Image: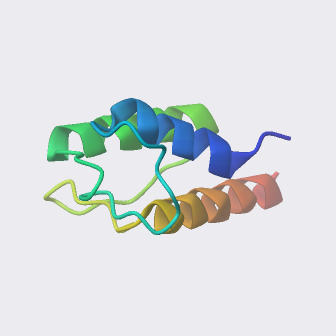
Amino acid sequence: MHDIASEVTSMIADKGTGSAAPIISDSLAELGLDSLQVVELTFEIEERFNIEISFNANFDIEAKTVGDLIEEVERLVAIKANAH
């Protein structure tokens, strides 16, 4: 089983502009992610974990912090696993 938190954090770090690794309490905005990067990150996470993350018409994902995003991915992965 893969470690969702470390994979998501790594994916965020790859998109971010800062040199420090993101931490759970960092907001996605604080990490310097613009709207295009958030959309790209969302698609990459969806593809990696075979899930669908909901976002609104402005391409603003519901997760506001790194921790929120990790929790959402873990929740969606668990739902998918329980469906099979």
Residue 9 sits above or below residue 60 on the image: above
The outermost residue toward the right is 1
Point 52% across, 66% down: residue: 67
Percent of width and height locating residue 48: 58, 32
Q: Residue 60, image x and y in percent?
A: 23, 60
Residue at 30 percent across and 51 percent down: it is: 31
Q: Residue furthest front?
A: 20
Is 2 placed left or right of 11 in the picture?
A: right
Res. 50 in view: no
Q: Is residue 67 visible?
A: yes
Toward which corner of the image does residue 27 lie, by quadrant? bottom left
Number of numbered discs visible in the structure rendering: 0
Say if 8 sits above or below 74 in the image.
Answer: above
- Asked if residue 21 lies left or right of residue 5, the reply is left
Colour pattern of the rendering = rainbow
User: Quadrant location of residue 44?
Assistant: top left
User: Foreground: 19 or 1?
Assistant: 19
Q: Position of residue 74 (x, y in %)?
A: 66, 59
> Which residue is at a point 27% across and 36% down the rendered structure image?
17
Q: Farthest residue in the left direction?
A: 58
- Give percent across and percent down for residue 63: 39, 66
In screen coordinates, is 9 left or right of 35? right
Residue drawn at x 18%, y 38% is 36
The quadrant the N terminus occupies is top right
Residue 3 higher or lower than 68, as above or below: above
Relative height, residue 10 to residue 72 (above, below): above
Quadrant location of residue 79? bottom right
